[in-house]
Image: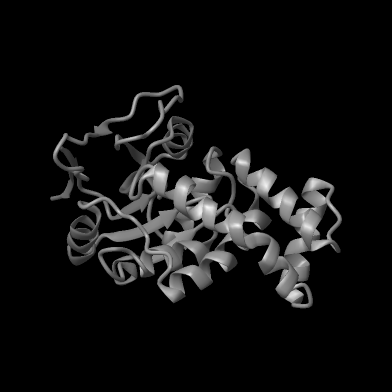
């Protein structure tokens, strides 16, 4: 068990609060299936034009051709590129799925009670994911356990900075108004945890079913899962 006496908890999503398989097999598949139609239907929208131009600049695709741009977006997804305009586009596509009920976000069984306990204890709980802030709010607002957003005080994505750079975590701590040493960052990716530790945060490695080897250079205390359940065994005392 990790006993944490700080003031804030910062959580990753994929491989930490939700399974990697849900993100790749459900969310990414939904986005790939709908991206072409979405770009074509909204080609005249100013917000989509801006995203299309950013994706075109990043991939070399023709921003005025929805079909080619969709193929470029699918290629980025296949390669798991942490592209800011792609993540924004995914969030817009997922909105329709979540709002219609076609998509329901998976969270591990321990996540809802942990979020409730932490927020009720006065901890400032926030999310930092490569997925857009729009996508994060939709995700936690439409989980199998209901709307979890009342337990979350904030969201950060790659517009704050790359997740493997210490400066990103320093910016988050400053935005939270909390000293880095009083924030616990939980992730399944060693390089992200290394960056957070470099910025002065406490860190914990999420060990979930289906997670990959974490990599990274430093050791981070694990939050273990057992066979019967998956528990975020971090307490605030």
Expressed as whole percent of the image width and height from the top left, the position of residue 70 reads 72, 56
Write down the quadrant of residue 220 in the picture. top left
> In the rendered image, which quarter contains the N terminus?
top left
Q: Residue at x 67, y 57 (%)?
A: 85
Vertical placement of 72 versus 149: above or below? above
Front residue of 214/1: it is 214
In the displayed structure image, the side of residue 188 where residue 156 appears, left or right: right
Above or below, 160 against 41 in this view is above
Color style of the picture: one colour
Of 120 and 215, which appears nearest the observer? Answer: 215
Q: Position of residue 122 (x, y in %)?
A: 22, 64
Q: Position of residue 162 (x, y in %)?
A: 58, 44
Can residue 116 be seen? Answer: yes
**Residue 42 horizontal side relative to residue 25, left or right:** right
Q: Determine which quarter of the picture holds residue 20.
A: top left
- How many marks overall? 0
Residue found 58% across the figure and 66% down from its top = 93
On screen, 153 above or below 187?
below
Q: In this image, 106 relative to 87: left or right? A: left
- Residue nearest the observer in this picture, 63 or 11: 63
Q: Nearer the viewer, residue 1 or 17?
A: 17
Residue 142: x, y in percent? 36, 68
Q: Is 81 located above or below residue 104 in the figure?
A: above
Q: Does any portion of residue 131 appear in the rendered image?
A: no
């Amino acid at each position: 068990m990790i006993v944490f006496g700080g003031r804030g908890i910062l959580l990753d999503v994929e491989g930490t609060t939700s399974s990697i398989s849900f993100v790749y097999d459900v969310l990414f598949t939904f986005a790939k299936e709908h991206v072409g139609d979405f770009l074509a239907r909204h080609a005249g929208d100013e917000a989509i034009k801006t995203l299309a131009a950013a994706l075109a600049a990043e991939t070399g695709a023709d921003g005025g051709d929805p079909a080619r741009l969709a193929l470029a977006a699918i290629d980025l997804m296949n390669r798991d590129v942490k592209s800011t305009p792609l993540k924004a586009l995914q969030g817009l596509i997922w909105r329709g799925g979540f709002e219609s009920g076609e998509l329901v976000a998976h969270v591990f069984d321990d996540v809802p009670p942990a979020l409730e306990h932490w927020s009720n204890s006065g901890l400032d709980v926030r999310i930092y994911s490569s997925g857009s802030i729009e996508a994060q709010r939709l995700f936690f607002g439409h989980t199998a356990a209901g709307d979890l957003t009342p337990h979350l005080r904030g969201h950060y994505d790659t517009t704050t900075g790359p997740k493997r750079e210490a400066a990103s975590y320093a910016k988050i701590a400053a935005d939270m108004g909390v000293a880095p040493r009083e924030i616990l960052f939980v992730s399944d990716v060693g390089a992200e945890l290394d960056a957070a530790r470099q910025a002065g945060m406490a860190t914990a490695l999420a060990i979930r079913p289906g997670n990959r080897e974490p990599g990274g250079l430093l050791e981070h205390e694990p939050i273990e899962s057992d066979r019967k359940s998956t528990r975020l065994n971090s307490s605030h005392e």
